[in-house]
């Protein structure tokens, strides 16, 4: 009964279907219809019930699965090996295990995706909240032929790809908070963690992990004031659109593949920095540089070809590397 009712509601998503109509169509009682609707709601379907009009399907749950992900892939090589997990400790940790399990780098381009992480890792030893069914948690495993010192720029490349992917799928226009947080309306929506295994002059593997807040409606207390999700931001704009995490992943991977190939040609951001600076929320803004040797304020001008942030202070320009210091807005997080 549940499936049959769902089919009718799907076919009539623009309008309401009366309870009476459903009863007559399937020859069941009002209670039976009501029970089926209740079960659908429990499974995550959002169904609006209005007196004298009936039921209307508002949203279908965003189910992530291997086949759903593969059906949304449009890349040349990236992600042709998808490893999907309902639960994993951390997609970054899992990607690292894959790289270390064999000497042959046939894992290059593998993408590890999870519905939930039990030990999601953030930057600077922090954790990344990863409840099931809410976010998009994934890691790209690559073995680029670059000098280890150039690897940190890949994080900025990933930030750009994420902004592009989100814009394409949602129509919203997020920005980058240097070096790689993706923000919208002054709140963080995406975190990126790049981890590398290398020798002095040789990269063994690089894992670029991304967490996108998609369906979250609330956050742990410590980030409640600075975090947001795609759902919350769409709601703010009065939109009820449903976001498919698989579609979002497909879009981000397509853009990463393209930017990554551009980056590889010069092994720096010379061909990308103009576009990056257009996405940069900090550009022209006052920032506070959290330098362990002494904090100071200045105006962010944009990045150079190595991804360093140029900050002007008293007529002098300092170049800031992301590994050493972080910046935040003078009046808040951005
Ligand atoms: C940050 O602190 O801003 C970076 C957060 C990165 C989180 C993602 S979620 C997928 C991948 N797996 C992890 O354990 N971390 C990254």
Image (tube, grey):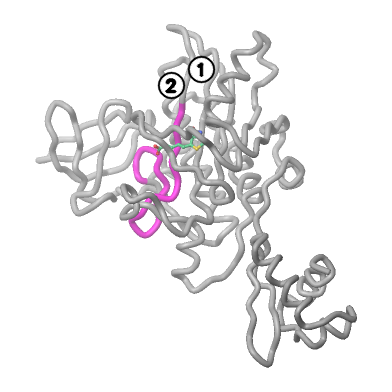
Element carrying mark 1: loop
The circle on residue 150 is 2
Question: Would the CB of label 2 be found within 8 Å of ligand 1?
Answer: no
**x and y, in percent, of residue 89 in the image:** 54, 30
Q: Please report the residue visible at 51 percent of the width from the left and 13 percent of the height from the top.
A: 203
The circle on residue 146 is 1
State the extent of the magenta-drawn residues as a range: 177-194
- In the figure, 292 relative to 201: above or below? below
Q: Please report the residue visible at 63 percent of the width from the left and 32 percent of the height from the top.
A: 111
Residues marked 1 and 2 touching at CB (< 8 Å): yes
The rendered magenta stretch, by its main secondary structure, is classed as strand
Element carrying mark 2: helix
**x and y, in percent, of residue 68 in the image:** 73, 47
Q: Please report the residue visible at 45 percent of the width from the left and 42 percent of the height from the top.
A: 129
Classify mark 2: residues with Cα within 10 Å, few (<14), some (14-19) or many (20+).
few
- In the figure, 77 relative to 103: above or below? below
Q: How many marks?
A: 2
**x and y, in percent, of residue 53 in the image:** 69, 89
Q: Please report the residue visible at 47 percent of the width from the left and 30 percent of the height from the top.
A: 154
Q: Residue furthest left?
A: 314
Check residue 193 for magenta coloring: yes
Q: Quadrant of the N terminus?
A: bottom right
Label 1 and label 2: CA atoms lie apart by 7 Å
- In the figure, 259 relative to 219: above or below? above
């Amino acid at each position: 009964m549940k499936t049959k009712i769902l089919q009718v509601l799907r076919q009539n998503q623009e309008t309401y279907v009366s309870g009476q109509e459903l009863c007559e169509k399937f020859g069941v009682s009002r209670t039976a219809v009501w029970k089926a609707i209740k079960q659908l709601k429990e499974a995550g379907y959002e169904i609006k019930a209005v007196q004298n009009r009936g039921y209307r399907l508002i949203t279908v749950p965003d189910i992530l699965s291997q086949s759903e992900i593969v059906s949304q892939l449009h890349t040349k090589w990236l992600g042709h090996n998808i490893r999907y997990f309902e639960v994993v400790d951390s997609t970054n940790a899992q990607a690292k295990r894959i790289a270390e399990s064999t000497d042959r780098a046939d894992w290059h381009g593998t993408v590890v995706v999870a519905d939930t992480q039990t030990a999601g890792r953030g930057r600077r030893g922090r954790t990344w909240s990863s409840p099931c069914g809410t976010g998009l948690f994934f890691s790209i495993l690559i073995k680029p032929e670059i000098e280890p010192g150039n690897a940190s720029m890949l994080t900025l490349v990933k930030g750009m790809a994420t902004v592009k992917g989100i814009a394409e799928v949602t129509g919203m226009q997020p920005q980058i908070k240097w070096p790689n947080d993706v923000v919208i309306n002054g709140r963080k929506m995406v975190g990126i963690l790049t981890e590398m295994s290398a020798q002095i002059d040789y990269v063994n593997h690089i894992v670029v992990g991304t967490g996108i807040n998609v369906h979250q409606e609330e956050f742990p207390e410590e980030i409640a004031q600075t975090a947001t999700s795609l759902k919350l931001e769409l709601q703010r704009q009065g939109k009820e659109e449903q976001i498919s995490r698989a579609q979002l992943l497909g879009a981000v991977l397509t853009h990463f593949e393209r930017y990554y190939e551009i980056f590889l040609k010069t092994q720096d951001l010379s061909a990308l920095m103009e576009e990056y600076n257009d996405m940069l929320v900090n550009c022209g803004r006052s920032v506070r540089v959290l330098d362990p040797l002494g904090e100071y304020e200045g105006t962010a001008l944009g990045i150079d070809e190595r991804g360093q942030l140029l900050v002007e202070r008293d007529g002098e320009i300092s170049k800031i590397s992301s590994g050493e210091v972080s910046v935040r807005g003078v009046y808040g997080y951005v």
